[in-house]
Amino acid sequence: MANRIPVIAVTPGEPAGIGPDVVIKLCQQALSTQVVAIADPTLLADRAARLGLPLELKEYDATTNRANNAQELFYVPVSLAAKVEVGKLNPANGRYILNTLDIAIDGCMSKRFDAMVTAPVHKGVINDAGVPFSGHTEYLAERSNTEKVVMMLATEGLRVALVTTHLPLAQVPAAITPHTLEQVIKILHKDLHDRFGVEQPLIKVCGLNPHAGESGHMGREEIDVITPTLNRLNASGFTLEGPLPADTVFTPKHMANADTILAMYHDQGLPVLKYKGFHNAVNITLGLPFIRTSVDHGTALDIAGTGTADHHSLAYALNQAVLMCKNTV
């Protein structure tokens, strides 16, 4: 279809949290793409009524490719196991959450959907349901048989990717090996080129230690691991700068021409990004065989159903997914 628009699967995440709220709020305006919620339609209808927001639910038909009208939401039905009490977790619905993810993943793998956008889940309630679950990213990688994925967060004017993610700080140095660092940089470079349309990505790489190790006086990881890896990759055609001190890499001088900052660990890079773009940031999983973006916030059980949840992170995640669809080569 020559004029086909992207079809984006959205999983509302934890049904007792704000995921359904922000999906419904997103759909109050006309959209520029086709958004399909993978969810129990009763959940969506009940939550819309609680929020006092109009919502017209239409079961998704793959033969109809058009953008959502205002107050309209396409859906693929998935049945809840138990009635949802807003703000209260119920392990009985743990498998339901995974079922929504499975349908979205399978739809992306089969090209039924062009991308998936995920609202937050609560890891604990899924584990309480008897299903080992460490997070969206790991689950998507396992279900798609992807060996290595990279977490990148983005907001207006800044992208930050991570070498390590949810590790105790004491375990980070040992996790930064030449092999891991090379894997991450290659995935980051490829997706910046293939999905963001950056012809020759410039990636600025943080050191691990303060002042990037101060010539070995504050740690040797830069000398023994990071610098040799960057030199080897630069010699093969990459454009990498570093290792750079993390306390100055986010200054205008460095940011002016950087396509991405690569941080060594979670709390080295993400506080800066979240300060700059909270509620207007997106979590992007690189390395998957499909496009996946996510909101940058949690389930916020305490405000679910109150109407106060901010949907702008979901809107930004959707916009990024659409841009990636359009830029994909």
Image: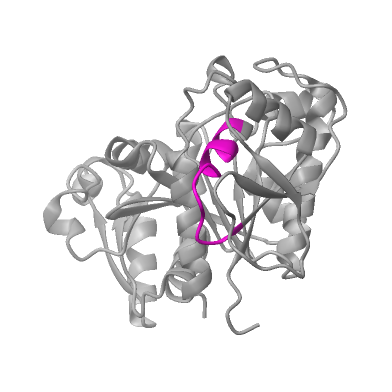
Q: Is residue 313 visible?
A: yes
Relative to 77, does residue 81 appear above or below in the rendering? above
Using residue 168 as the reference point, say whether residue 153 is left or right of it.
left
Residue 297, position as x, y percentages in the image? 49, 33
| Residue 125 is one of the magenta-drawn residues | no
Residue 81, position as x, y percentages in the image? 88, 29
Q: Is residue 51 or residue 310 the one in the foreground?
A: 51
Which quarter of the figure is the N terminus placed in?
A: bottom right
| Residue 31 is one of the magenta-drawn residues | yes
Residue 321, position as x, y percentages in the image? 51, 59
Instruction: Check the image and tell me how it is coloured.
Output: one colour
The magenta region covers 21-34
Q: Who's the residue at 54% across and 22% down the image?
A: 300
Q: Is residue 146 or residue 291 the one in the foreground?
A: 291
Q: Quadrant of residue 12?
A: top right
Q: Is residue 289 or residue 267 the one in the foreground?
A: 289
Q: Who's the residue at 34% across and 81% down the image?
A: 235
Q: Quadrant of residue 46?
A: top right
Relative to 213, does residue 24 appear above or below in the rendering? above
Image label count = 0
Using residue 92 as the reference point, say whether residue 62 is left or right of it.
left
Q: Is residue 283 visible?
A: no
Using residue 196 as the reference point, say whether residue 130 is left or right of it.
right
Using residue 31 as the reference point, say whether residue 45 is left or right of it.
right
